């Protein structure tokens, strides 16, 4: 709730200033383009791209690697049509490889073993002779207990 309030205040401040208003409009347009592009492009490609700009109908996209860039270049004519069908004023797509682009990493939650799996690991470790495997299984069974 507080974050929403602060976000609204920031938007009001930025929209109230003429210089910031054009910047906000440009940022919003790029955000909209990113959303439209994500909707029409193959999901495996949308994770490794970032919309850079739209100038005179030419959409510039940064790809995280050469393989993604090559596939985007191949799909560019089809993607232009799909974006135009969504009301975007795009007449072409330029793809740049920008390896330094850090795409957001998905948040992962550590997995925990269930009680049955823990018991099975413990049972397996008991059946083994003293070894590194037995120690590793014991540590794993103890480490994952909730």
Image: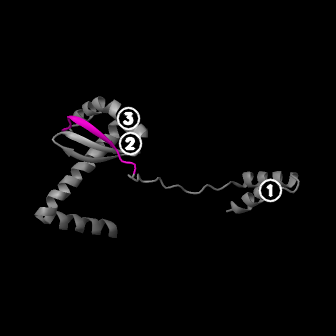
Say whether residue 67 is left or right of residue 145.
left
The quadrant of the rendering that contains the N terminus is bottom left
Q: CA distance from mark 1 to mark 3?
A: 46 Å
**Mark 2 neighbour class, 10 Å CA radius: few under 14, some 14 to 19, many 20 or more:** some
Quadrant of residue 62 in the image? top left
Q: Which residue is mark 3?
A: 70
Q: Is residue 81 left or right of residue 47?
A: left
Assess whether residue 94 is covered by the magenta stretch. Answer: yes
Q: Position of residue 131 (x, y in %)?
A: 84, 55
Can residue 102 be seen?
yes
Q: Position of residue 4 (x, y in %)?
A: 31, 65
Mark 1 neighbour class, 10 Å CA radius: few under 14, some 14 to 19, many 20 or more: few
Mark 1 or 3, nearer chain start = 3
Residue at 33% across, 67% down: 3
**Element class at badge 1:** helix
Magenta stretch in the rendered image: 89-99
The residue beneath circle 2 is 46
- The residue lying toward the viewer, choosing from 68 and 146, is 68
User: Tell me, what colour scheme is on the image?
Assistant: one colour
The residue that label 1 is drawn on is: 132
- Nearer the N terminus, badge 2 or badge 1? 2
- In the drawing, does residue 25 fall left or right of residue 102? left
What kind of element bears circle 3? helix
As rendered, which of 50 and 123 lies closer to the eye?
50
């Amino acid at each position: 709730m507080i974050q929403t309030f602060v976000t609204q205040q920031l938007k009001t401040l930025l929209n109230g200033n003429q210089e910031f208003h054009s910047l906000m409009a440009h940022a919003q347009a790029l955000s909209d383009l990113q959303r439209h592009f994500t909707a029409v492009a193959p999901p495996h490609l949308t994770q490794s791209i970032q919309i850079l700009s739209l100038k005179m109908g030419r959409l510039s996209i940064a790809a995280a690697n050469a393989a993604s860039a090559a596939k985007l270049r191949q799909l560019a004519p089809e993607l232009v049509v799909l974006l135009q069908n969504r009301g975007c004023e795009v007449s072409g797509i330029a793809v740049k490889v920008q390896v330094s682009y850090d795409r957001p990493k998905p948040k992962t939650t550590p997995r925990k073993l269930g009680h049955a799996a823990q018991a099975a690991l413990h049972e397996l470790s008991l059946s083994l002779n003293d070894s590194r495997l037995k120690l590793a299984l014991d540590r794993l069974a103890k480490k994952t207990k909730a």
